[in-house]
Amino acid sequence: MMEKLKQRWNIKNGWDVVVILLVFACTGFSILYIKRALFELVGLDDTKAAWIRWTVNIIVILPLYQVVLLAWGWIWGKFAFFWEFEKRMFGRIGGMFRGNKAQSDR
């Protein structure tokens, strides 16, 4: 698995894989706590309609995840990797909406 990730992410050593996985883990946990606090602040709980919670997740939490990912990447010294990672991800998402198959395959 480690070798597969090194090839996929174009990195040279196993320590970088560990750090990158740690950044994803820290980001996920951070977003869980931020989301919980944000939902409590605005009064969103399980009694609200699911479509409202999903809408807030997509409009607020998803972009916030990207910012937190870059912040953790910077803290762990992998900002350049995550900056490129996000540019590729947004290129793929943009390609889906443009219908440009070549762009979404990069």
Image (spheres, rainbow, N blue to C red):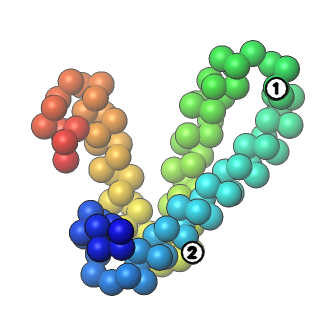
Which of the 4 image quarters holds residue 49?
top right
Residue shown at the point (63%, 33%) measured from the top left:
57
Within 10 Å of disc 2 (Cα), the crowding (few <14, some 14-19, many 20+) is few
From the viewer's perspective, is 101 left or right of 77? Answer: left
Identity of the amino acid at label 1?
A: Asp
Q: Is residue 85 left or right of residue 76?
A: left
* Residue 24 visible in the snapshot: yes
Q: Which mark is residue 46?
A: 1
- Secondary structure of the residue carrying tag 1 is loop
The answer to whether 97 is drawn above or below residue 69 in the figure is above
Position above or below: 77 against 41: below
Kind of residue at disc 2:
Ile
* Callout 1 crowding tier (Cα within 10 Å): few <14, some 14–19, many ≥20: few
- The spot of residue 35 in percent (x, y) is 73, 43
Q: Is residue 91 above or below residue 57?
A: below
Q: Residue at x 54, y 67 (%)?
A: 23
Residue reaching furthest to the left? 102
| 6 or 88, nearer to the observer | 6
Disc number at residue 75?
A: 2
